[in-house]
Each structure stands twice: as C-alpha cells, then as structure tokens.
Image (cartoon, grey):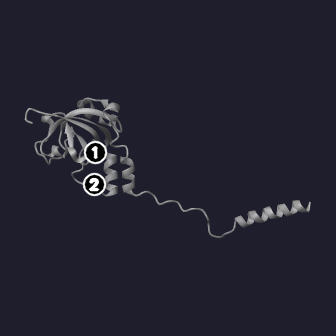
Amino acid sequence: MKLYRFAVASFAYAVISGCSTGPSSAPTPPPPPTAAQILAAASAGDFTCTAANAASISFDKLIGSARLYADKCVRTKGLASFRFVVRDAATMPAQKDAVIPHSAIGLYWRDDVMRKLDTGPQFVEIVGRIRSCDARNKLEQAAGTSSPTTPCRSATVAMFVSQSRVFPTAMD
C-alpha cells in the first residue's frame, strides 16, 4: 500500500511539475514564406511540359477558351514574337513594342534561345503550360519582379514554353 501511495504521489508531482510556468520548450514556428518564395513555388511546374504529354489544341480554340486550359500542358501553332504568340500576321500588332493584343497569349520561355524572335516574328509550334495572368501578376507584383514588358502585364493567359520548333518561311 505504501508503494502504491508513493507511486501516486510521484506521478502527481511529475504532472504538477510539467505544468510549471517556466519557459516553453515548444519550437517557434518558421516564418511565413516570402513573396519571392511563393512565386518560386508557384513556378516550379511551369516548364515541365513535353510534346509527349501535351494536348494538341488549335490556336483559335485555345484563345477562345483559354481559361479552360489553365494549368494544362498544350501544344499549338502560331506567329510568335519573344513576348507573345498570335494566330497569324493579320492579328500581329504593327509596332514591336505595342501592348500585347487580347487575341494573343503571353509567352515565357524556359531559356533565352528564342530571343531572336525580337528581331522578327516566326511561325512556331510551341509546347507549354497555360497559366492565368491574373494570378501570375499578383505573385510577380508581391515578389517585386513585375515589369511593364512582362508577358502577363497585358495578356489574359500566358504559356510557359518548354519546347518549340520554328517553321522557316520564304523570307528566311
């Protein structure tokens, strides 16, 4: 019986000691992610498309219902400059530095290889992930990486191009 009382008393003492008002040993939570970290995490899957897993969509169908293809991997053809792609020359803005037309899809390229499209648009087949520009603009602005020439600044959707093929024209 004495052993039982001793055990109960020891248990009660341990419980009371554990509830002391001393410093907490609980770990402090990590700081919330920065806007740049959030943008990096949101961009992780941007350039993961390949021709093998892309749905082939006509440009007209894609631009007509672009929001339906948000976050999807697609393949389409059009006339591309470095910042955007349009259906054809009739829908290409006359000035190189013009605002991206509403009938265009903004383009983000995996690398700068296609910078040559700044000198003149080319017909291309592109494979990439479609993203909503509303969400992208908010992330870029919060991260402090937005600029007036960012493809999403005036486009509704953008494609993050992971593969491309240029079709030579008679002028090449």
Q: Is residue 53 left or right of residue 78?
A: right
Q: Secondary structure at mark 1?
A: loop
Q: Is residue 132 left or right of residue 83?
A: right
Mark 1 crowdedness (10 Å alpha carbons): few <14, some 14-19, many ≥20: some
Residue visible at 83% across and 64% down in the picture:
9
- The residue singled out by tag 1 in the image is 110
Residue 140: % across, % down: 32, 53
Residue visible at 29% across and 35% down in the picture:
66
Mark 2 crowdedness (10 Å alpha carbons): few <14, some 14-19, many ≥20: some
Q: Secondary structure at mark 2?
A: loop
Placement of 156 over or under 125, stated as above or below:
below
**Dividing the image into 4 quarters, which one contains the N terminus?**
bottom right
Tell me the number on the disc at residue 26: none
Tell me the number on the disc at residue 146: 2
Q: Amino acid at mark 1?
A: Arg
Mark 1 or mark 2, whichever is nearer to me: 1
Placement of 11 over or under 140, stated as above or below:
below
Residue 59: % across, % down: 23, 32
Q: Is residue 81 left or right of residue 133?
A: left
5 or 146: nearer the eye?
5
33 or 93: nearer the eye?
33
State the image quarter where residue 32 is shown: bottom left
**Residue located farthest toward the bottom when viewing the structure as drawn:** 22
Residue 118: % across, % down: 15, 46
Q: Amino acid at mark 2?
A: Ser
Q: Is residue 30 left or right of residue 136?
A: right
